[in-house]
Amino acid sequence: MTHAVELRAVHRVYGRGDTTIRALDGVDLSFPTGTWTAVMGPSGSGKSTLLHCAAGLERVTSGAVSLAGQDITGASDGELTRLRRTKIGFVFQSFNLMGALTAEQNVALPLRMAGQRPDRRKVREILARVGLGDRLKHLPRELSGGQQQRVALARAMITRPAVLFGDEPTGALDTGSTRVVLGLLRELVEEGQTIVVVTHDPAAAASADQVLFLSDGRIVDGLNSPTVHQVAARLAQLEVTV
Ligand SMILES: Nc1ncnc2c1ncn2[C@@H]1O[C@H](COP(=O)(O)OP(=O)(O)OP(=O)(O)O)[C@@H](O)[C@H]1O
């Protein structure tokens, strides 16, 4: 089994002296290629920090991170930027689309940023794939939240990233739109995409292949193909002990 991302003995410390916070406190894990992992844990347990370190958005204090077979621990800023543009896709809770650009232009943006000439047919294909083939010229404000997140997903996928990361990607969506986005993520995984998502929602986590639980910056548990009930029960236990 190959691993799209590996973290070895990762520590991420903020501040110093009395105000030191160990956001990640010795994390060892691997995200197998072509699987979907959800990361859960109480507020402040280190989920976003883990995601950012795994995606090369943030540097680790100690330990090692490898992404798509490349050790990124000592990568320069330029190398990290290149890596982010070519190897990873990111979807946020708040969509983060460019308000002045159409759906089509938003999806083409990562290609332009990487210095490529966007292939219009590919952009349209991927928007059709997320069910927005008839919304190409719409601005974000003319789209519903669920539609905006599908544009964001298309934008994240246009570079065919080695890993798709999501920070609460369904956090701002209603039940129907959440179902659509989770369904799209499942389709992508079935096609071999590696996905890592942070979520507070047990139903969203239960859609993943495995769920990792963080507490105080450490991985304390993992469940394979859990039910919503199992996820909710484990999370509740961790929240009680915080
Ligand atoms: N830039 C920073 N400077 C100082 N402390 C930080 C910084 N970023 C995060 N922290 C701290 O690190 C710890 C982990 O934060 P993180 O955002 O990773 O948690 P989280 O599990 O994602 O929380 P939430 O579910 O509330 O979003 C917290 O105690 C937080 O206050």
Image (tube, rainbow, N blue to C red):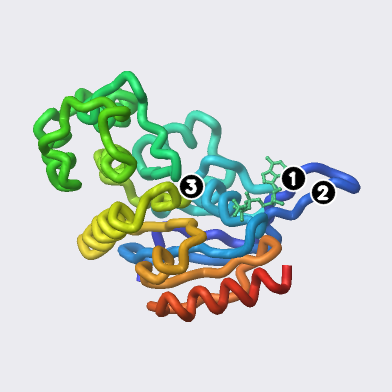
Residue 57, x across and y down, in percent: 53, 40
Q: Position of residue 8 (x, y in %)?
A: 59, 61
Does the CB distance between marks 3 and 1 fall below 8 Å?
no
Q: Nearer the viewer, residue 88 or 188?
A: 188
- On residue 20, the disc is 2
Instruction: Kindly identify which numbered label has been placed on residue 14.
Output: 1
Seen at 37% across and 68% down, the residue is 208
- Mark 2 is surrounded, within 10 Å at the Cα level, by few (under 14), some (14 to 19) or many (20 or more) other residues, namely few
> Foreground residue, 25 or 106?
106
Q: Nearer the viewer, mark 2 or mark 3?
A: 2
Describe the element under mark 1 as helix, strand or loop. strand
Residue 235 sits in which quadrant?
bottom right
Q: Mark 2 vs mark 1: which is more N-terminal?
A: 1
Would residue 179 appear left or right of 85 to someone viewing this image?
A: left
Dot 3 amino acid type: Ala
Quadrant of the rendering where the C terminus is positioned? bottom right
> Mark 1, residues whose alpha carbon is within 10 Å: few (<14), some, or many (≥20)?
few
Marks 2 and 1, how far apart at CA: 6 Å
